Image (spheres, rainbow, N blue to C red):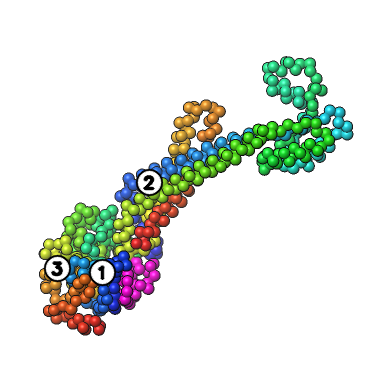
Amino acid sequence: MIKLFNVSKYYDGSVPALLSTTLNIEKGEFVFITGPSGAGKSTLLKLIYGTELPTGGQMIVNGRNFQKVPRREVPYLRRRTGFVFQDFMLLKDKNVFDNVALALKIRGLPKDEIKERVSNMLAYLKIQHRANFNPLSLSGGEQQRVAIARALIKEPILLLADEPTGNLDPDLAFKTMELFKEANNQGTTVIVATHDRALLDHYHKRIITLDHGRVLPRVGQSETAPQPAEELNR
Amino acid sequence: MSTTRKILYASEDAYTSIKANLATTILSSVTVGFALALVALFLIIFVNLQNHVEGFGERTHIIAYLKENATGVSKELIGTDVKALPGLKEYKYITKDEALDRLKEELGEHKAIFEGIKSDIFPASVEIKVKDTYRDPEKILETVEELRKLKWVAEIQYGQENIEKFAAFLAFFKLAATILGIFLTAAVVFIISNTVRLTVYARKDSIHIMKLVGASDAYIKVPFFFEGILVGLTGGIAAAAMLELTQFFFTGRIPEYLSFIITNPFGWAILVILVIVGMVLGTAGCLISMRRFLRA
């Protein structure tokens, strides 16, 4: 699903964010990316989503190399990937319903279908009563759920989440993770960047640890996680 | 079908966005309106002044007085000679009687002083008007030189000094107006493009988010395109209204002989032109301003 070979990313040509990173994430996997602030977690997700391009190395996401994809095709690739941003990235001049519907409107789906799917998704995330509210009037947790709804409504084959529980209390954080787990159970590849120790310990999923832009071998990885040497060779 | 729906959704987005940013949209329309009205007012004053000034030129003509008792000179010969002159637009043969009648007419109530005087004392003449392209001093001299060669010509009047002054003034007027027009147009384009840029800048986050969600450039552009059209349309109408108000305000407040300056010589066409220019500047400004945010 995702293959990185010796991928590096430097901002402004000299500030290193990711260094010679090689990794492989299989279709249907649930992976945590962890590490301290500035380790390169967000950069890795941005590279996978195509909002940043690598400075060096090669990477393939769902069979496509972003470095070679024409600019006009990028939006179409993003329509098959959901991204839950740390700061939600909701449109302030649209209500909750329209924020979620946007992901379907841009594909030109019929109005009735959009209405039904968005209503179901809002009900699924228990925020249907906020459909006509402006996102700014919602709590952090509610905004987070709107962002998740917008990502999941695409029925993505790949779901990326950058610190999705950073603004949530522990209870809501676990509820959010359950949503991701549910998506994963339905076949979506899920990659979550977090430094929430409790989540990492609770879910026995593969963990990729980054530090200063490099992937670290991890001691005491969960049973399902591959060994570092194995990871490099996959 | 899907494309039609996308355009429909984008149009709905435009409506929502205009409603949400109504104050900015109105401000942009008013700014565009003022800017366009300024250029239109300049254009109206320029065209009116130019027409007026050129009217002076229209009245410039050469008068060739005929020799007394010139033998073998007929009206036909004069006609043939004059028609061969370079730059001739039209000519008129003035007989001695007509010359006297004209003078009496010009004197008005004092014409009685010419009672009893015979037209014999006045020379017959030919009034010659030259083409617009022949209205500069050098070319008029060319025509005058040709006239001098004719055997029936006694004296020539062509107001050399006036023609030179007029030509110099006209050249200066056109140059000054062109330079002023360029500065004014540049300033107006700058004002409109900055107004539009600010409108787009205020929504740069929305553009960024829509890109992240997977909207194509075209989908993102459509609402801005409609907004550009709306701002241009309302701005153009506002400009036309401002022009009408200006004319209304000045009518009766400035001397009658100056009223031609603010009279709109273009009629309804100015409204159409202002609206089209407004829409072109509005949409082009929007789309150009968006490019850097779309590429980001």
> Which residue matches tag 2?
B28
Same chain check for tags 2 and 3: no
Based on the picture, tell me whether residue A73 belongs to the magenta stretch: yes
Same chain check for tags 3 and 1: yes
**Kind of residue sitting beneath label 2:** Ser
State which region is magenta: A51-78
SS at badge 3: loop
Looking at marks 3 and 1 on the same chain, the residue that comes earlier in the sequence is marked by 1
Q: Residue at x 32, y 56 (%)?
A: B204
Of marks 2 and 3, the one in the foreground: 3
Q: Residue at x 88, y 32 (%)?
A: B71
State the image quarter where residue A233 is shown.
bottom left
> Which residue matches tag 3?
A196
Q: In the drawing, does residue B128 fall left or right of residue A133?
A: right
**Separation of disc 2 and disc 1 at Cα?**
42 Å
> Which residue matches tag 1?
A17
**Separation of disc 2 and disc 3 at Cα?**
47 Å
SS at badge 2: helix
Disc 2 residue crowd, few under 14, some 14–19, many 20+, Cα 10 Å: many
**Separation of disc 3 and disc 1 at Cα?**
21 Å
The disc placed on residue A73 is none
Of marks 2 and 1, the one in the foreground: 1
SS at badge 1: strand
Identify which residue, A145 or B127, lies in the foreground. B127
Give x and y (percent) for residue B253: 48, 27
